[in-house]
Image (cartoon, rainbow, N blue to C red):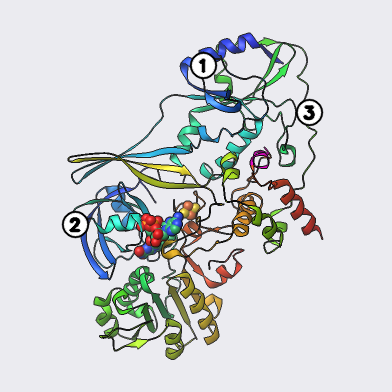
Amino acid sequence: MSGNGSNPMRPFIGRLAGIRDVATGIRLFQVEMAETEGQAAAAGYRPGQFAFLSAFGAGEAPFGLASGRGPYLEFAVSALGHVTHTLHGLEVGDPVGVRGPLGNWFPMEEIKGRNVVILGGGIGGAPLRPVIHTILDNRDDYGHLTILWAARSPDLLVFTDEFDEWRAAPDTEFHVTVDRGDENWSGNVGLITQLLEQVAPQIDNTVTITCGPPIMIHFAFLTQQKLGFTPQQMLTTLEARMHCGIGKCGRCNMGEKFVCIDGPVFWQYEIKEFLEGFL
Amino acid sequence: MKFVTQDALRVWLDQLAQEVDLVAPRDVEGHVLYRPVASSAGVLFEYQRPEMSAKDYLFPATEVLLQIEQRGKEMTLEEIVPERKQVLFGLRPCDAHGAAVIDALFLQQEPVDAAYRRQRERTTMVGLACPRMWEGCFCTSVGGAPDAADHLDLLLREVDGGYAVQVVTEKGAALLAGLELQEKKGEPPPSQADGEIVPVAPPQAWRTLFEDEMWQRHGERCLSCRICTYVCPACRCFDVVDRVTSVQPGLTCSERIRVWDACTSTNYRRAAGGHNSRPTKPGRIRNRFFCKFCYYPEDFGPLGCVGCGRCIVSCPVDIDITEVMRGVAERSDG
Ligand SMILES: Cc1cc2nc3c(=O)[nH]c(=O)nc-3n(C[C@H](O)[C@H](O)[C@H](O)COP(=O)(O)OP(=O)(O)OC[C@H]3O[C@@H](n4cnc5c(N)ncnc54)[C@H](O)[C@@H]3O)c2cc1C
Ligand code: FES
């Protein structure tokens, strides 16, 4: 459950156990929960869920959980505004607040036995990291894994330190592209949708998981459809401005759906039925 | 019927004012508003519809959720728990109805909103029936009535020489100690519930009109001023922010506050990175009306509108919710 005791708006107190840069302007925060209730909540976390991270005095904001294999809750935070800049100013040992894990999760059980295509755009790669880890750590449970990773520029690619592991994993292919290269970049240049068309993954018995900015999700879905994927094969996580994460504040509605409690993970056939679009 | 004279009512209110946080309609520089009172002096007994609903006393416009203290690397978070009981006196039935609408989401959907529950639990609602419907009122179209007792704890109705008292809940009964009640023959006459009935189209009918041109027409006029959401007894959107209250060496104090928010404001849907999935006024005003008549009833049960008419009289550009309701009913018929 979210929040502490009987108050879902009260964060659990945590402590920053580690901080490192994962791309230009994007910092990974490892949080150790200080209270038992918070530890129990964190232990129940599933890939795809999100949590609010508080920089006390500045506020709180929602982030897709990017946790790795260690004991910590991990957040990849892009510095964009007040809360996120304040978070970037914190140091190891500083206290933070965590409300969550919240929302639904990727159906990792349901998709066992199927091939998985992962499309991560920019900071959207954050909640996909635990998905990739789940598949790699239970390699026999899933079919072929295709990872397509993208960012606007090379310095904005996240989790580059894990690329070698992903590339070398059995029955796994890894492709990366950037919208614009730089002098050191010798890899693919172009949109993730172009890369997807080139790679043309197998359609049969495959599930796709797309995470990135709304515009990328929109075009990635179109390309997937063109390649032959059906709405029942395409998963994504949606973003929306959120102030509560528990279906109360009204901020995140898309028609009668709330991204925070009905999502953030949706199948494309669900999104198609939304009265109001996400774009 | 149970009956109380106005004098006895005043004695009771004077006593309540000592024991609880008493809120009642008052004249504030020519505006009728629900306000805290220290005695029965200044309490209005004859008034129309207060300009703002009583929502502020259950779901405050600015509410401290947490008091935050940071000493070095140590944090303490304290929740604000109001100690005193609260009595809302002279509540119009539509305002109690509004609280019931918010209850459906904040209390009846898990997880329960802790701050709201505390306010609700400490509060007893004493209604004073409207003798008739006022300008803009259409409560009878959305399940209410000027003398509806449904969502109140006690309901008073003006009768000759005083008030008829109807006990609605146990909470209401518990408040009666000190109120000098008499038994009188007869029943109070019903209020004049003669407002025009505005048609309420079902959620499914609204769905068919999501892309209708009427949203363009209504939305173009909207100034995004948000007054409709602030005066509304049933609007419940909120934002949550922190503010630092004091900084001393080794000790920083701040508060996490929640504030009313409005889905009609310009940047409501603006997300990090600048993406805004509801960038136009027609899209936002459509969301407000759909919330009230389609999403809220589908998701939580009740309509998100109690027919108080405040948004109609306060809108600076005359956007009229009943005109929208009629438009939807007419178009979805065809
Ligand atoms: C489910 C979910 C998962 C997310 N996951 C991640 C993640 O893993 N990593 C990540 O970095 N982010 C993630 N986000 C986004 C993250 O929540 C935002 O970046 C964060 O809320 C920004 O907060 P802030 O206070 O720093 O920014 P704000 O100060 O609120 O501003 C953010 C940006 O919007 C602009 N802005 C805000 N308000 C206005 C306004 N009124 N007018 C004009 N411009 C405005 C600011 O200028 C700034 O560019 C996620 C969001 C959701 C909903
Ligand atoms: S974030 Fe508050 S309702 Fe979804």
Give the numbered dot on residue B16.
1
How crowded pointer 3 is (Cα within 10 Å; few <14, some 14-19, many 20+) is rated as: few
- Residue under pointer 3: B192
> Chain ID for label 1?
B
Disc 3 and disc 1: Cα gap in Å? Answer: 30 Å
Q: Position of residue A88 (x, y in %)?
A: 26, 59
Left or right, B259 with respect to B323, comes to: left
Task: Return the residue nearer the eye: A14 or B255.
Answer: B255
Does dot 2 land on a helix, a strand or a loop? loop
**Is residue A51 in sight in this rendering?**
no
Q: Of label 3 and label 1, which has the lower sequence position? A: 1
Range shown magenta: B308-314
> Looking at the picture, which amino acid does disc 1 mark?
Leu
Q: Quadrant of ligand 1?
A: bottom left
The answer to whether the residues at label 1 and label 2 have Cβ atoms under 8 Å apart is no
**A52 horizontally vs B129: left or right:** left
Residue flagged by tag 3: what amino acid is it?
A: Gln
Write down the chain letter for disc 3.
B
Q: Label 2 sits on what residue type?
A: Val
